[in-house]
Structures are given as structure tokens and as C-alpha cells.
């Protein structure tokens, strides 16, 4: 099978990184091409793409009205002659002139849906996204996001902690990932409950960094909350095991890839009660949760964890569940199965 994947950029986002993982699995038995439209390119990520994959970097300037990148894209598609074109973000469907069947993956619950009728098949990264898409009037098939569980270093033992080390991984982007909720919860723990035996590392960077820094300074949390900045996946996968608790405080989340990664590191997780993250812990069976956007409730749940510590049996069950359901090999294989349904 010949597969063409189209996306706007190959940056540092989780979606782009996961696409590379999917492509590296698909290219083992198929001809695969990646086309990135814009000039936001992470060279390190590009280097991780299997050499058997054809890579087309059009380097269009964002906002440019120059039609040449679109002409080049269509020329590349014509020469490659794919059996299926897989689009990963909205906005360029109308610029594809090939009659090849086109499919689309919905990554979140904020996609408008304007382009959905133009695709032969829609895929949702979680049941939560599928349910939302259905509320918009469109049917889709769930293909869960995936990770490489065997590349994540695991905690080898659960020891009682004196200071609870907490980690949160995500881009600092407005209020999307909710790091401000976590900082407010830390403020409540320290200044309302008088709890001091915790430390929070926030991994990630973005336009909200200055705001988060100000919140930390104003609440005198410098000894308890640290911004580590952007770290690559190798760093994250080798350091998750160093923490006692993973927190996902997002306000919007279609799935929860970082939650699955923490679970595979055998770290207890505490997530917002959005459908996507809750799906990763199967409705609360394999992790703790708090009311989305509620810093007070998040503080209460962290406080409770500080008292009880980790449940080893729950951690092992969570690991087995994530390993079985969210392996990237399963994701890549399911996409191939779904492509065949479209083209046959």
C-alpha cells in the first residue's frame, strides 16, 4: 500500500512526534510519504524518520499567499501516486487536487468540522473525540493514540517518600494544558493547608511561561514549583520514573498521551476528569482524577495522595492496561486495517 501523510509542520508537538512513530511502523511493510507544508520544522524529529519514508518539506511561510508550495505538493502526490491520503490537521483539504481517497484524523474536541464531509473516513484519537464528533453530526472510527511503552524507563520499586516529587508535561500554551491550575493548587497546599512536603516540576515551554513564572513568584512557590523548560522525549522517558506522581491539569484534552507514558513508567497519575484522559485510566480504575479546572479539588486530591501514597496493585494493573491498549504498533496496524476498508 502507498500512504501519503499530510500535515502543516513537523515541529515538537505530541501529534507530530506520534505521527513519526506511526510512519516508522507503517513503512516496514508499505510505501510511505510525509508532506509537511509550512517551514516550522524540527530537524531532530526529521532525523528520526525511517530512511525508507519519502519526506517532502515544502517550507511554506506561515500566512503566505504564494501558491507554489501547493503546486509542489500536488506534483509530489501525483508522482508518488498514493492509494490513500491521510490528513492530520484542518485547512488544506481544498488544496489537494488528487482523486485519491482522503481520510482525516481528529485530534481534539475543538476542530470545527467544516471539512469533515470532504473525507472518505474520519478517525478519532479517543472515544471521547468520537462522541464529540458524533454530536457535531459526523461518524468516526476510534484509533487510539499510541506510545512506545518498552522505551520508557520504569520505577523498579515504590518507596515511601518524605517529599513527594510531582511532574507535569505539556506545552505552556494559554490555558489549554492547565499548568496555572496546578500552580494554584500548589498555592492552596502551601498557604491554605500548610503542606510543604511536595515539589513540582513542570516540563514544557510556550507563550504562557511568563504568566506561570509570575504566578510562582507571587505565591512564593519558588522552592516548590520549578519550570524545567522544553525537554525531548528521550529525557522525559528516562526521567518519569524519578517522580512519585504525574498530574495532568488540562482544560481541553482529546486523549492524554502523557498520562499513558507516565502509567508505563509505573508512576501514579492524577488527571482532570475530561473524557479523553479518563479514557486512558478507564474511567478511574487505573488512576485518580479531579474536577477539571478546579484548583481546590486538585489540591485536595494531591493532599490525599500525600497521606496515602501509591497503591502498588493499582499501578501494576494500570501498566498492563496501557501496555495492551496504547502501544504504537497497535495504532499503526489499526490504521492500515482501516485504510483497507476505505480503498477496497
Image: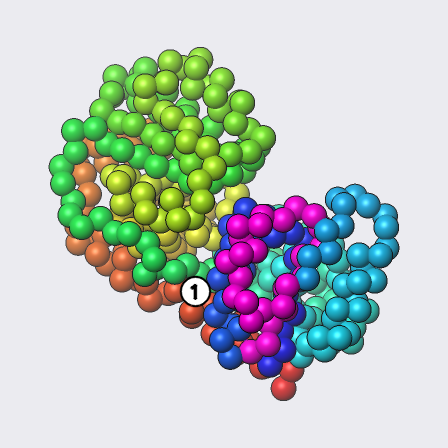
Q: Is residue 181 visible?
A: no
Numbered disc total: 1
Q: Is residue 16 above or below residue 269?
A: below
Residue found 68% across the figure and 76% down from its top: 82
Q: Residues within 10 Å of mark 1 (few under 14, many from 20)?
A: many
Image spot of residue 170 (x, y percent): 47, 40
Q: Which of 196 and 226 lies nearest the eye of the viewer?
A: 226
Image spot of residue 70 (x, y percent): 80, 59
Q: Is residue 79 magenta?
A: no
Q: Which residues are magenta?
A: 30-55
Q: Is residue 29 above or below residue 272?
A: below
Q: Is residue 222 above or below residue 151?
A: above
Which residue lies most toward the bottom here?
Answer: 344
Residue found 47% across the figure and 28% down from its top: 180
Q: Is residue 53 magenta?
A: yes
Residue found 54% across the figure and 67% down from its top: 51
Left or right for 205, reference 31: left
Name which quarter of the figure residue 322 lies in: bottom left
Image spot of residue 274 (x, y percent): 45, 46
* Residue carrying label 1: 328
- Could you say whether the residue bearing mark 1 is in a helix, strand or loop? helix
Image spot of residue 161 (x, y percent): 16, 33
Q: Which of 163 and 59 lies nearest the eye of the viewer?
A: 59
Amino acid at each position: 500500500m502507498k500512504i501519503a501523510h499530510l500535515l502543516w509542520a513537523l515541529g515538537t508537538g505530541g501529534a507530530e512526534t506520534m505521527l513519526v512513530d506511526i510512519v516508522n511502523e507503517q513503512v516496514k511493510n508499505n510505501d510511505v510519504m510525509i508532506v509537511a507544508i509550512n517551514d516550522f520544522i524540527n530537524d531532530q524529529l526529521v532525523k528520526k524518520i525511517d530512511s525508507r519514508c519519502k519526506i517532502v518539506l515544502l517550507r511554506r511561510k506561515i500566512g503566505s499567499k504564494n501558491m507554489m508550495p501547493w503546486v509542489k505538493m500536488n506534483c509530489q502526490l501525483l508522482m508518488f501516486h498514493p492509494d490513500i491520503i491521510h490528513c492530520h490537521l484542518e485547512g488544506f483539504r481544498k488544496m489537494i487536487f488528487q482523486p485519491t481517497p482522503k481520510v482525516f484524523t481528529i485530534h481534539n474536541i475543538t476542530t470545527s468540522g467544516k471539512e469533515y464531509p470532504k473525507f472518505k473516513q474520519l478517525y478519532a484519537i479517543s472515544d471521547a473525540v468520537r462522541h464529540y464528533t458524533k454530536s457535531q453530526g459526523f461518524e468516526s472510527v476510534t484509533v487510539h493514540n499510541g506510545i512506545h511503552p518498552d522505551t520508557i524507563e520504569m520505577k523498579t520499586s515504590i518507596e515511601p517518600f518524605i517529599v513527594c516529587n510531582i511532574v507535569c508535561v505539556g506545552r505552556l500554551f494559554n490555558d489549554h494544558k492547565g499548568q496555572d491550575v496546578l500552580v494554584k493548587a500548589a498555592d492552596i497546599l502551601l498557604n491554605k493547608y500548610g503542606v510543604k512536603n511536595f515539589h513540582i516540576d513542570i516540563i514544557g515551554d510556550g507563550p504562557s511561561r511568563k504568566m506561570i513564572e509570575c504566578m510562582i513568584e507571587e505565591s512564593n512557590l519558588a522552592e516548590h514549583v520549578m519550570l524545567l523548560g522544553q525537554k525531548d522525549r528521550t529525557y522525559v522517558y528516562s526521567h518519569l520514573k524519578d517522580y512519585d506522581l504525574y498530574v495532568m491539569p488540562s482544560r481541553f484534552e482529546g486523549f492524554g498521551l502523557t498520562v499513558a507514558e507516565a502509567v508505563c513508567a509505573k508512576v501514579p497519575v492524577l488527571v482532570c476528569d475530561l473524557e479523553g484522559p479518563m479514557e486512558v485510566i478507564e474511567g478511574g480504575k487505573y488512576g485518580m482524577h479531579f474536577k477539571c479546572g478546579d484548583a481546590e479539588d486538585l489540591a485536595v486530591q494531591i493532599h490525599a495522595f500525600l497521606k496515602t501514597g501509591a497503591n502498588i496493585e493499582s499501578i501494576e494493573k494500570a501498566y498492563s492496561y496501557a501496555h495492551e491498549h496504547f502501544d504504537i504498533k497497535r495504532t499503526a496496524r489499526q490504521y492500515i486495517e482501516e485504510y483497507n476498508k476505505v480503498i477496497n
